[in-house]
Amino acid sequence: MAMNWKNLSGIILFYGVATLTSVQVAEAGQPQDPARTYQPFAEEFNRATQRSSGNFFSKRDLLHQIGRFFGVPSFPEQAISDDNRRVNKLYLDEQRRQFSSTPVIRTPDLINPYDTSVMTAPPSESLPSFGGN
């Protein structure tokens, strides 16, 4: 029995196209506990810088412009100051968390053949010459 190459190549082509174009369903969803998920603190800093003052592009409508002119809910300088205060507090908290999470490692200094400093050396006998004089 002879093999029909035309049908075989059609079957191979069909399976190749079906394999390459297969659709997979993506499962989107929120994590179960957002407090336990990893959030880099760079994202926390980004949120802290725009919490009160907001984003330039999102506050361009007439209502926000009039509200900012009359200080409702706050003047832009006050909102920026609040954001800066929040960023400073977040920075200090992150520093505390970073330095308190690991023990302090104390190591001796490396052996150094130099036991004096240039600042404690006696003055030189010769005067420096500048410009080849």
Image (cartoon, rainbow, N blue to C red):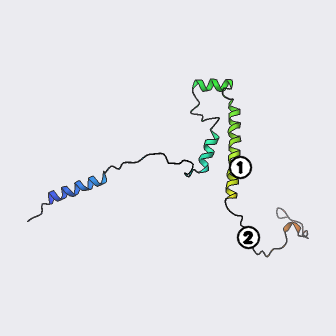
Q: Label 1 vs label 2: CA separation?
A: 26 Å
Residue 82: quadrant of the picture? top right
Residue situated in front as seen by the camera: 96 or 122: 96
Residue situated in front as seen by the camera: 92 or 70: 92
Residue situated in front as seen by the camera: 93 or 126: 93
The type of residue carrying mark 2 is Thr
> Residue at left 65%, top 27%?
68
Residue 44 at what x, y percent from top left? 61, 46
- Dot 1 or dot 2, earlier in sequence: 1
Residue 17 at what x, y percent from top left? 27, 53
Graded by Cα atoms within 10 Å as few (under 14), some (14 to 19) or many (20 or more), the crowding at tag 1 reads few
- 54 relative to 23, above or below: above
Give SS at disc 2. loop
Which residue is tagged 2? Answer: 107
Residue 113: quadrant of the picture? bottom right
> Residue at left 31%, top 53%?
20
The type of residue carrying mark 1 is Leu
Q: Is residue 24 left or right of residue 110?
A: left
Q: In this view, does 93 lie to the left or right of 25?
A: right
Q: Which residue reaches farthest left?
A: 1
Residue situated in front as seen by the camera: 88 or 27: 27
- 120 relative to 48, above or below: below
> Residue at left 68%, top 46%?
90
- 48 relative to 115, above or below: above
Residue 40 at what x, y percent from top left? 59, 51
Q: Which residue reaches farthest front?
A: 32
For the N terminus, the quadrant is bottom left
For the C terminus, the quadrant is bottom right
Which residue is tagged 1? Answer: 92
Residue 93 at what x, y percent from top left? 69, 50
Give SS at disc 1. helix
